[in-house]
C-alpha cells in the first residue's frame, strides 16, 4: 500500500530533504500534492518529476508551474494562494502531510491537517510554538498523529519507550499516565551554540548579518540561522517540546553541544539517559517520521564515531544569549506568551537583517514586546492569528519609537 503524501513547502529545505527520502522509496510513498510559493520554476521541475494530482503556488504563478512541468489541463490541478494549502492538507486522498511552510500560512495548513486527522510531520516551528497545546488537544479529538520532525524532538521521540510514543501519537500526553510519566525524569535538548558560541559579550553587539547566518553544522534558511545564533531557535524548540511531550519547562534542559552529533536525550528514573545520535542531516528525522514505526534508508551519511572523536557538552550562557531565558519564561507563562515571543522575534530578526537593530537588541526588543502585551489564554486558531498580528504591531511601534544604538556595521 502506498502512503500518499502532501509536501507543503516542497522547494524549501524541509521539502527538499523529504523529497530526497521519497526518491529512495518510490515503491512506498506517492507524492499526491506539492506546494511551493514563489519558486515556481523549481516547483515546476518537481511537479514534472513527481506528477502530483494537486499543486499549490503563490497567486499568479500557476502558468509558470504548468509550463515548466509540461502539465496538461486535466492531469493536475494547480491552485493559487494560501487557501490551496488548507485544501491539500485536509484532502481525503492524503494520508501524510509534511509541513515545511513558514509563517501564518504554515499555521493554518498544519492546523487543517490535524483537524482532518492526518499523520502530520510537523517540521515548521510556528504551529507548536504558537498554539502547541491547542494542536495537541485537536489531535486528541480527531485522531491525527503528530510526528515530531524537528531533529531535537524527533530525537526525544526516538528515545522514548514505545508505550510513551503511542501515547503521544494518540494525542495523549507523556505524563498523563502516572507510571509512564514517572519513568521519565526529563529531557535534554542539545544546541550547537551557533556561530557566536565563543564570541565575547563585548563583541556580540557588533556582529554582522553575514556572520550570524553562517551556521557551523546545519545548512538552513537565514531566519532560522539567525535564531540559532541568538539561541532563540533552542528557546522555540523548548516551547515546542513542552507542548509535544506535555512537560513543564523545568523538565526540559538545554545544553550546548557544538558537534551536533547527539540530537537530544531522555533521562529516566533509574539513572539511564538515552541519546539519539546521527549526522546533522534532516533526512534522518524525516525518514523516521515518514516510516515510523519502521526504519528506512534515509540517504544520510553514517556516523563514524572515531572521526567525531569527542563530544562536548556545556551550559548555555544566558547572559550572552538572553533569548533562551525569554523563551523559557514564555513557556512557563503559557497562553499567548509563546505566540507573542515568536512574533516579536520575527520582527526583531528582520530588523537585524535590515540593519536597523544590532544583534544584542534582538532580545531587548522581544522583552519589551512581551512586557507590553497582556496575557490571555489560547482557545482557538483565530485568536492565535490576532495575537500574532497584535504582537507584530507592538514590536513595530517599539522599533520606531526608539532610536536604537547604531551598533550595526559591515554587512
Ligand atoms: Mg532543530
Image (cartoon, rainbow, N blue to C red):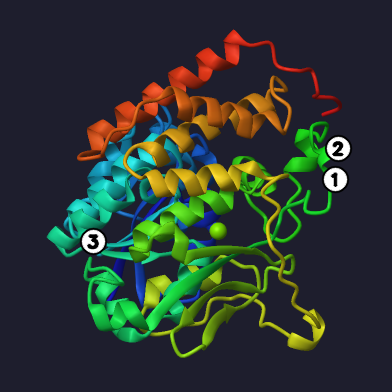
User: Is residue 343 depicted above or below 309 in this figure?
Assistant: above
Quarter the N terminus occupies: bottom left
Taking the image as shown, residue 119 lies to the left or right of residue 195, namely left
* Residue 330 in the figure: left or right of residue 229: left
Above or below, comparing residue 205 to residue 256 in the picture: above
> Which residue, given by chain and number where applicable, does mark 2 sit on?
203
Decide if residue 23 is in sight here. no
Are dots 1 and 3 in contact, CB under 8 Å?
A: no
Kindly identify which residue carries mark 1. Answer: 200
Residue lying at 51% horizontally and 88% vertically, measured from the top left: 271
Ligand 1 is found in which quarter of the picture? bottom right
Foreground mark, 2 or 3, reads 2
Above or below, 191 relative to 398: below
Quarter of the image with the C terminus in it: top right
Residue 253 lies, in percent from the top left, at: 54, 64
Residues at circles 2 and 1 in contact by the CB criterion of under 8 Å: yes
Give the distance between the C-alpha atoms of the residues marked 2 and 1, in whole angstroms: 6 Å
- From the top left corner, tell me how far across and down residue 91 is, in percent: 20, 52
> Is the shortest distance between ligand 1 and the CB of mark 1 under 8 Å?
no
Q: Nearer the viewer, residue 384 or 184?
A: 184
Q: How packed is label 3: few (under 14 Cα within 10 Å), some, or many (20 or more)?
A: many
Label 3, on which residue? Answer: 118
**Residue sitting at x 26%, y 43%:** 86
Disc 2 or 3, which lies upstream in sequence? 3
Query: Residue 177's quadrant in the figure?
Result: bottom left
Give the secondary structure at mark 1: loop
x and y percentages locating residue 340 in the rendered image: 42, 33
User: What separation in Å lies between label 1 and label 3 (alpha carbons)?
Assistant: 47 Å
Most extreme residue toward the left, as rendered? 141
Q: Which-is-in-front pick, marks 1 and 3? A: 1
Amino acid at each position: 500500500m502506498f502512503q500518499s503524501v502532501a509536501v507543503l513547502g516542497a522547494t524549501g529545505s524541509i521539502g527538499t530533504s523529504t523529497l530526497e527520502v521519497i526518491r529512495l522509496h518510490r515503491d512506498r510513498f506517492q507524492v499526491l500534492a506539492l506546494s511551493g510559493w514563489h519558486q515556481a520554476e523549481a516547483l515546476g521541475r518537481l511537479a514534472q518529476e513527481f506528477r502530483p494530482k494537486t499543486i499549490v503556488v503563490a497567486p499568479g504563478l500557476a502558468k509558470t508551474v504548468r509550463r515548466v512541468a509540461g502539465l496538461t489541463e486535466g492531469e493536475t490541478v494547480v491552485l493559487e494562494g494560501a487557501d490551496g494549502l488548507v485544501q491539500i492538507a485536509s484532502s481525503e486522498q492524503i494520508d501524510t502531510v509534511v509541513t515545511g511552510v513558514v509563517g501564518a500560512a504554515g499555521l493554518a495548513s498544519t492546523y487543517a491537517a490535524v483537524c482532518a486527522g492526518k499523520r502530520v510531520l510537523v517540521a515548521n516551528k510556528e504551529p507548536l510554538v504558537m498554539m502547541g497545546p491547542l494542536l495537541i488537544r485537536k489531535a486528541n479529538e480527531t485522531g491525527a498523529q503528530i510526528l515530531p520532525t524537528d531533529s531535537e524532538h524527533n530525537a526525544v521521540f526516538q528515545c522514548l519507550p514505545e508505550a510513551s510514543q503511542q501515547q503521544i501519537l494518540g494525542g495523549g500526553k507523556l505524563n498523563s499516565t502516572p507510571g509512564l510519566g514517572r519513568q521519565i525524569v526529563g529531557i535534554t535538548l542539545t544546541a550547537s551554540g551557533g556561530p557566536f558560541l565563543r564570541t565575547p559579550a563585548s563583541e556580540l553587539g557588533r556582529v554582522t548579518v553575514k556572520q550570524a547566518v553562517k551556521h557551523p553544522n546545519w545548512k538552513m534558511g537565514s531566519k532560522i540561522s539567525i535564531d540559532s545564533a541568538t539561541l532563540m531557535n533552542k528557546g522555540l524548540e523548548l516551547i515546542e517540546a513542552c507542548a509535544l511531550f506535555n512537560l513543564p519547562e523545568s523538565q526540559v534542559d538545554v545544553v550546548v553541544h557544538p558537534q551536533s552529533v547527539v540530537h537530544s536525550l531522555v533521562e529516566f528514573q533509574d539513572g539511564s539517559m538515552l541519546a539519539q545520535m546521527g549526522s546533522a542531516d534532516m533526512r534522518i528525522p524525516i525518514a523516521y517520521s515518514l516510516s515510523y514505526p519502521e526504519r528506512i534508508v534515509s540517504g544520510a551519511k553514517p556516523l563514524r564515531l572515531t572521526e567525531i572523536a569527542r563530544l562536548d557538552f556545556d551550559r548555555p550562557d544566558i547572559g550572552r544569549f538572553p533569548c533562551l531565558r525569554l523563551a523559557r519564561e514564555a513557556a512557563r507563562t503559557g497562553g499567548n506568551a509563546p505566540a507573542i515571543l515568536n512574533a516579536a522575534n520575527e520582527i526583531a530578526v528582520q530588523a537585524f537583517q535590515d540593519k536597523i537593530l544590532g544583534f544584542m537588541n534582538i532580545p531587548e526588543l522581544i522583552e519589551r514586546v512581551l512586557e507590553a502585551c497582556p496575557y490571555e489564554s489560547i482557545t482557538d486558531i483565530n485568536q492565535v492569528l490576532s495575537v500574532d498580528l497584535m504582537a507584530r504591531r507592538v514590536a513595530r511601534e517599539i522599533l520606531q519609537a526608539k532610536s536604537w544604538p547604531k551598533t550595526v556595521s559591515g554587512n
